[in-house]
Amino acid sequence: MIDPQLLRKDTEAVARRLADRKVDFDVAAYNELEAKRKDSQVLAQSLQAERNQSAKSIGQAKAKGEDIAPLLANVADLGKRLSAAEVELSAVQQALDDLLLGLPNLPHESVPLGNDESENVETRTWGEPTQFDFDVLDHVDLAEKRGWLDHDGATRLSGSRFAVLRGPLARLHRALAQFMLDLHTTEHGYEEVNVPLLVQPSAMLGTGQLPKFADDAFATTDEPPRYLIPTAEVPLTNLVADTILEAGQLPVRMTAHTACFRREAGSYGKDTRGLIRQHQFEKVELVHVVQPDASYDALESLIGHAEEVLKRLQLPYRIVTLCTGDMGFAASKTYDMEVWLPGQSAYREISSCSNTEDFQARRMKARWRNPETGKPEYVHTLNGSGLAIGRCMIAVLENYQTADGHVRIPDVLQPYMGGAEII
RNA sequence: GGAGAGGUGGCAGAGCGGUUGAAUGCACUGGUCUUGAAAACCAGCAGGGGUUAACGCCCCUCGUGGGUUCAAAUCCCACCCUCUCCGCCA
């Protein structure tokens, strides 16, 4: 959530920064609502003060044994006026909250201006696109040729955009998850966390999936619903919701390997072939909770941790800085990591690392006690994939394929594959 | 699923419907004392919000949401959560 104080004080400037994100913020409508809020709140609070005062004097009079009947007559209609004022205030407040909860984060000043993904900025590349002296297969042809991908089985079970992996491919998938978790916990200083895959609406609100993107998530039918997590960012980050951390507890670094679930509403026809875009996929997620002044350094280390996975796997990639028009709802700044896929002759997203500054922290009331002020202040939260396991598996298949349809196993994965060098 | 107990400040733990946002203890912070530390003593110490140039004033919050009342931590209703026992179960 954007700081309500900032919005109130500097409405025009906020509107300009939102415009960079293609959000049309109606300043006049906001000002009107805000003025109404102020009036309602002042009125409601003064009536509350009046009620408190009179209740107090009635109590005192009664204690002295005085006649309280005239005092009661005095406040006869106060209750009605008060509850009317309170009803109005909460309606205005609700409207204001709805407005605020629907606004995306403000972009950081270092974020390039742009309308869509075509204006993202390539920040660096690592490695060279893999060269082959034979015609490469994409991951679908390769995996089906070897009987590793049970497309019919997946469709029978769950419909489109689901996958069944078999044999060595299932193991490769597991090996990747294990390798990533081990790297982040033993070398990058993350705590491994195992989290629920179903969360309450409050958690989805905290990280920004709700209220605006309810249609993107699967929900249960109980009331209130629970949501299948679209990313472990949701449970991991919300672990610090409603808490005040001591300075010594920061930074918090957590990682979790989970399944993720997405409706993929609105992506009809996109990536229908293969495993790139599924309703259910697995991911190793990285989350940082840090002091505000440390969050941009944390973003650099976060993307570095994600990069290290591909470096060890010897997979070529590039880092892209998302422009203002392409960033996610909660992000102030985002780096995407894209891995080279020979089957598509293209770089494809495999990780996205974002600093949300205090946007999520404010929604979920995640704070720390600043020793300099002694006061609770919002933390900054960051999240990134480290990495998407399915897409990483695709990258291994396509980049490590051999002319006869086998796949060499990257050195760092061999211990997780029972020593196999090729499958 | 059944039976019972309970949810109050960082923690522990009081709280006849009425100057209780909350006694007391611990923890924490500052001070006195001390060569230093400890002890002792003194003082401070919840969060959020409104208003104000500021000092300050005011409002909300005792699991959550309703209700009764001039007045609710305290009474009533519903829900949530925790603990114990029974049942079921990976």
Image (tube, coloured by chain):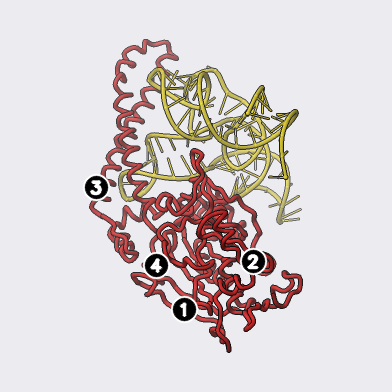
Quadrant of the rendered image containing residue A16: bottom left
Q: Position of residue B17 (x, y in %)?
A: 50, 19
Calculate the distance from the C-alpha at mark 2 to the C-alpha at mark 4: 30 Å
Instruction: Chain letter for mark 4, please.
Output: A
Marked residue nearer the N-terminal end (1 or 4): 1
Query: In this figure, what is the number of numbered marks?
Result: 4
Task: Name the disc covering residue A326, or none.
Answer: 4
User: First in sequence: mark 4 or mark 3?
Assistant: 3
Callout 1 crowding tier (Cα within 10 Å): few <14, some 14–19, many ≥20: few
Instruction: Work out whether mark 2 precedes mark 4 in sequence or the reverse, and give the earlier one.
Output: 2
Alpha-carbon distance for marks 3 and 2?
A: 55 Å
Res A123 label? 1
The amino acid type, in three-letter code, at marker 4 is Asp
Dots 4 and 3 on the same chain? yes
Residue at numbered disc 2: A173
Above or below for A273 versus A218 = below
Front-most of A71 and A186? A186
The tint of chain A in the picture is red
- Give the letter of the chain under mark 2: A
Label 3 neighbourhood size at 10 Å, few (<14), some (14-19), many (20+)? Answer: few
The type of residue carrying mark 1 is Thr
Task: Give residue A49's position: percent from left, percent from top.
Answer: 36, 30
